[in-house]
Image: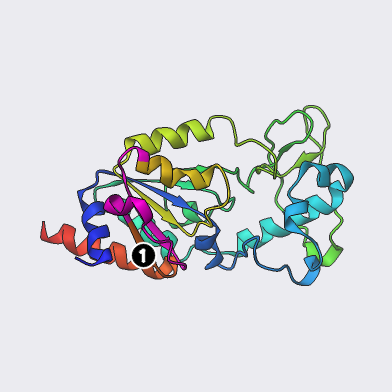
Amino acid sequence: MTDYEQAVKALIEAKKIVVSTGAGISQESGIPTYRDGLTGLWAGHNPQYLETANAFRENPQLVWGWYLWRRQQVARAKPNAGHIALHQMATLGRKVSIITQNIDDLHEKAGSKEVLHLHGSLATPQCFACHRPAVLAADNVQVTDFGALIEPPRCKKCNGKLRPGVVWYGEELPKGAWKTAMSLIKDCDVLVSVGTSGIVTPASDLPDIAFGLYKTVIHVNTIDQGVGEHELNEISLVGKATEVLTRLYSMMSKEVQTQ
């Protein structure tokens, strides 16, 4: 039995599937990862610095400009074949829940309903002072037209400056997000890990947690992560998320039709 056949067998036998996604799946829609060098307007800036509370305190106009630029990137991006394949899997009679490290809305654009954003979302800013979520007016400002320095809008409750509603370096996950993720992992039959670097904690712990609960884990990545000590319930599929997930869905669909 090939790795693909073994993976499809596990997915077909599963009633509940959890998919953990990282930057690799969105990269194929044109959204760069933090490992990619910045170009153009943001060349010379370090995204790992811009994604901190200290950076916002020191230069809120710069960080807000960075946030608007990233929102504009996401608004232009379209879900790719990988996002679509995950949505299609949910039409085969299995419950497919997605736990994503990504702060874009490409899973939702593809039609997925069960999406948990571990690191927050670019769609909803929050107040830096009182932490209340806020609604941002239609974004008509083009960062490339006005430069990188843009004054953040103010909170309607306390007049504090709005910040991106995402998890910055050194911050905790959104309240309840990790508890919900653990509940999904405990209740699933298979965990599919897609396009993750394996170094961003605590999201990188999800496969090991699933192993400890005797779940089958399927890795989808461009790098062979091996099966290590968990070879009895671990499968590694090497390739782009678009290609691997599309193939998995196609094979699953054929199996379902013959049942």
Visual colour scheme: rainbow
Closest to the observer, 176 or 193: 193
Q: Position of residue 212 (x, y in %)?
A: 36, 39
Q: How many marks?
A: 1
Classed neighbour count for the residue bearing mark 1: other residues with Cα under 10 Å, few (<14), some (14–19), many (≥20): many
Considering the image in quadrants, where does the C terminus appear?
A: bottom left
Residue in the picture at 47% in, 67% down: 223
| Residue in view at x 61 percent, y 59 percent | 74
Above-or-below relation of 29 to 118? below
Q: Is residue 175 magenta?
A: no
Q: Secondary structure at mark 1?
A: strand
Boundaries of the magenta span:
212-234
- Residue 170's x, y, as percent? 70, 40
Q: Is residue 77 left or right of residue 25?
A: right
Q: Residue furthest front?
A: 229
| Magenta stretch: includes residue 226 | yes
Residue 160, percent from left and from top: 82, 33
The residue furthest left is 259
Judge left or right: residue 85 versus residue 8.
right
Quarter of the image holding residue 201?
Answer: top right
Quadrant position of residue 206: top left
The residue beneath circle 1 is 237
One can see residue 17 in this view: yes
Please report the residue visible at 58 percent of the width from the left and 68 percent of the height from the top.
30
Residue at x 30%, y 41% (from the top left corner): 214
